[in-house]
Image: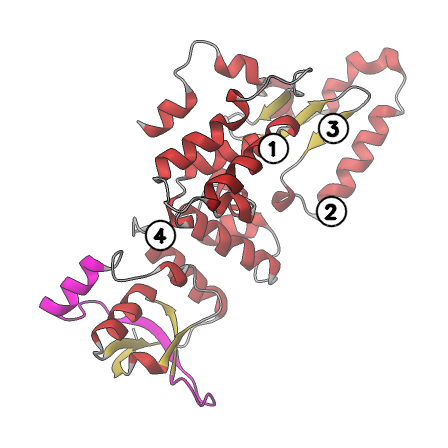
């Protein structure tokens, strides 16, 4: 534990890797914290470190964006627990705290993980999984949400409004060649409106964009989703007119794995056609025996409307 000091909140800044979209913090969505500060004071210090050679700021905060906003709003001192942490230790501390707080959105967490990878703080998605003790599927889903285009995010009043299930369904629509442009066009139209729609209505409109329009002449290609023995998606097989594509999550495929994939696929394609039946022994056992191939048509049979189910 470090020691706690009282600081001028206007002399504190958030560090570069904080995972809160602080531009969206305002009096309306911090009302509960403002009331608590006013009545009880600051109950939990923010976590930070001293800055030795910065003329504008005395402290850099690892976490505590909302508490910083409230202290500035009320013009009161901010309690800061001083602790020198490595970058990775600070990231873990921030993620652990924010996972316990319902107000940190999946989109914000996904953006953080994506920034960590781009900055080289973690070599791969697997390292994040091991360091945070998160499931690989959860980290993969959040990273996928972080890849939503700005035009889609801009259709919502705040990126924090995008629920995880909604973001993943919208990402599926964007992966479909036909639905992608219709969904993007609808997002642009929503963003231009003077009055903002509710998050539920935005989600509903985006998913319905390609359903209510004219049917395409040819059906969009169906993906076979290959899953592991726990039901987590591993990769997709997309069948086009003259080609078959393998869609792999970019964040989970290292250069070494890509080299192995190239060698394996090349070996299979150069094998005699009549030996195809004997190739199963070369596939990983969990893919050979337990993988499930699901098409969009199969997913829709006998189920509740996906849009209604995500709003319930």
Quadrant that contains the N terminus = bottom left
Quarter of the image that includes the C terminus: top left
Tell me where residue 211 appears, x and y as whole percent.
52, 21
Asked if residue 146 can be seen in this view, the reply is: yes
Mark on residue 162?
none
Label 4, label 2: how far apart the Cα atoms are = 34 Å
Q: Residue at x 81, y 15 (%)?
A: 276
**Marks 3 and 2, how far apart at CA:** 20 Å
Residue under circle 1? 180
Residue tagged by mark 4?
Answer: 104
Task: Give the Cα separation between the discs numbered 4 and 1.
Answer: 28 Å
- Give yes or no for contact between labels 4 and 2 (Cβ–Cβ under 8 Å): no
Name the residue rendered at 52%, 35% in the picture.
186
Secondary structure of the residue carrying tag 2 is: helix
Of mark 2 and mark 1, the one earlier in the sequence is 1
Q: Residue at 41% of width from left, 25% of height from top?
A: 307
- Queried whether the magenta region covers residue 23, the answer comes back as no
- Dot 3, crowdedness within 10 Å: few (<14), some or many (≥20)? few
Question: Can you give x and y, in whole percent of width and height, for residue 82 in the image?
Answer: 33, 78
| Quarter location, residue 77 | bottom left
Above or below: residue 140 compared with residue 70: above
Front disc: 3 or 2: 3
Q: Residues within 10 Å of mark 2 (few under 14, many from 20)?
A: few
The mark nearer the N terminus, 3 or 1, is 1
Q: Position of residue 292 (x, y in %)?
A: 57, 19
Task: Give the magenta range.
Answer: 31-58
Q: Earlier in the sequence, mark 3 or mark 2?
A: 3
Badge 4 element: loop
List the residue tagged with mark 2.
256
Residue topped by disc 3 = 245
Q: CA distance from mark 4 to mark 3?
A: 36 Å
């Amino acid at each position: 534990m470090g020691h706690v000091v009282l600081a001028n909140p206007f002399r504190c800044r958030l560090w570069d890797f904080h995972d809160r979209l602080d531009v969206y913090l305002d009096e309306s969505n911090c009302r509960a914290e403002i009331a608590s500060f006013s009545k009880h004071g600051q109950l939990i210090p923010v976590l930070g470190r001293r800055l030795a050679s910065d003329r504008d700021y005395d402290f850099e905060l690892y976490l505590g964006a909302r508490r910083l906003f409230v202290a500035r709003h009320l013009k009161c001192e901010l309690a800061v627990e001083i602790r020198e942490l490595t970058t990775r230790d600070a990231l873990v501390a921030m993620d652990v705290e924010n996972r316990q707080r319902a107000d940190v959105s999946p989109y914000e967490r996904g953006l953080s993980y994506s920034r960590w990878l781009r900055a080289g703080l973690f070599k791969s998605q697997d390292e994040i999984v091991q360091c945070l003790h998160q499931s690989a599927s959860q980290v993969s889903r959040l990273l996928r949400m972080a890849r939503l285009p700005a035009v889609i995010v801009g259709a919502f009043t705040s990126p924090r409004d995008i629920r995880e299930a909604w973001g993943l369904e919208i990402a599926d629509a964007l992966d479909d060649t036909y639905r992608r442009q219709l969904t993007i066009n609808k997002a642009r139209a929503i963003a231009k409106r003077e009055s903002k729609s509710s998050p539920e209505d935005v989600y509903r409109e985006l998913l319905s964009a390609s359903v209510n329009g004219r049917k395409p002449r040819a059906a969009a290609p169906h993906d076979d989703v290959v899953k592991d023995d726990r039901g987590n998606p591993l990769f997709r097989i997309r069948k086009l007119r003259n080609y078959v594509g393998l869609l792999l999550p970019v964040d989970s495929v290292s250069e070494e794995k890509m080299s192995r994939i190239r060698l394996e696929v090349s070996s299979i394609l150069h094998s005699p056609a009549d030996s195809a039946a004997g190739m199963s022994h070369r596939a990983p056992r969990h893919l050979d025996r337990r993988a499930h191939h699901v098409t969009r048509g199969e997913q829709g049979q006998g189920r509740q409307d996906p849009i209604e189910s995500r709003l319930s």
